Amino acid sequence: MAHSDIKAVRYEAIFQPVWDEYVRKARQSSFLFERSFMDYHADRFTDASLIVRNAKNKILALLPACESRKEEKCIESHGGLTYGGLLLMPETTTPEVEAALAACISYYKEQGYSSLIYKPLPYIYHAYPAQDDLYALTRQGARLYTRSVSSVIDLRCPYKFSTLRQRKVRKALSQTSLQMTGGIDNLPAYWNLLDQVLQEHHNAHPVHTLGELHLLMKAFPQQIELCVVTLGSSAVQQPNQDAVAEQVVAGCILFHTSQVVHVQYIAANDQGRQIGALDWLFAQLIERSRSHSSDTPYFDFGTSTEQGGKILNEGLIFQKEGFGARAVCYDAYRLDF
């Protein structure tokens, strides 16, 4: 197939229904690529997404992308998302993927850009093998730019918890009023806990504001799940007798895709850490996910690295690997043209 038969065009809002329909059928389907999710932070990122079509006007690939906020004349796929890269249909072939990537590069060059930061989806997100793009990148001369490590459980054959994690779970089980709940109504309480923990321990705030998370949870009620641990006052003596009978002490947010349960925003306050609330919560969530492993085989705790993988947070990864999770790489490639 001649490369000249394949063209890349800029995404426009009029294409949203076609874009979203394609995303849901792609080999690497993820709701993060639906426009309702991508465009919630459109004010922060200048979109540069492309639609690649062949001579018969059939879509061969989508490329979620934006202009880099760190470097001039640079495109990122995608700067506002955990991952990016070409989205492919099952019938799209390796030569077509090569041609699609070449068409994207040609388009960006014509627009005055000179480099591409490309973050392919890790293989655990593939509903069907989809590493054609890695081969195409190599052929174009791309180089590995960053590599972070995430901790993942294969729910079809999970490895056992460490002795320490088992002990923490047993300790948490002794708290008779420990409960797991969720729902958008609990989001303000959990976001406040999360924000406080991030400020105290990392001098930071959540990437998403409370309003943004509320908007996303309403837009994707089946894909974004809040899980919080509450503790009744009977389990731990409250210093203030007027304190509420039940409070949020730990939690996380889950992103559900077809292949992966991905954990976001893990946090526990001092009380939650004291009683092992997160250990108990993850034991519940892993067991629940394991019962659906034939549909969704992976449980992903997320990365434990900083500065593009140059620094490994050994304490954080120690905790995640204690649940039986092991390494999957989240890579980024750089292509200069």
Image (cartoon, grey):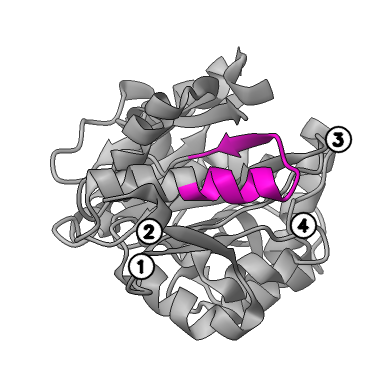
Q: Quadrant of residue 222?
A: bottom left
| Badge 2 or badge 1: first in the primary sequence | 2
Q: Which residue is mark 3?
A: 203
Q: CA distance from mark 4 to mark 3?
A: 24 Å
- Three-letter amino acid code of the residue under disc 4: Phe
Assess whether residue 174 is covered by the magenta stretch.
Answer: no
Which residues are drawn in magenta? 103-119
Task: Report how many numbered discs are placed on residues in the image.
Answer: 4
- Residue highlighted by disc 4: 45
Write down the residue under mark 2: 5
Sequence-wise, the earlier of marks 1 and 3 is: 1
**Residue 105, percent across and down?**
56, 43
Q: CA distance from mark 2 to mark 4?
A: 31 Å
Three-letter amino acid code at disc 2?
Answer: Asp
Q: Are marks 2 and 1 in contact (CB under 8 Å)?
A: yes
Q: Judging from the image, what secondary structure is the residue with disc 2 in? A: helix
* Kind of residue at disc 3: Asn
Which of 154 and 37 lies nearest the eye of the viewer?
37
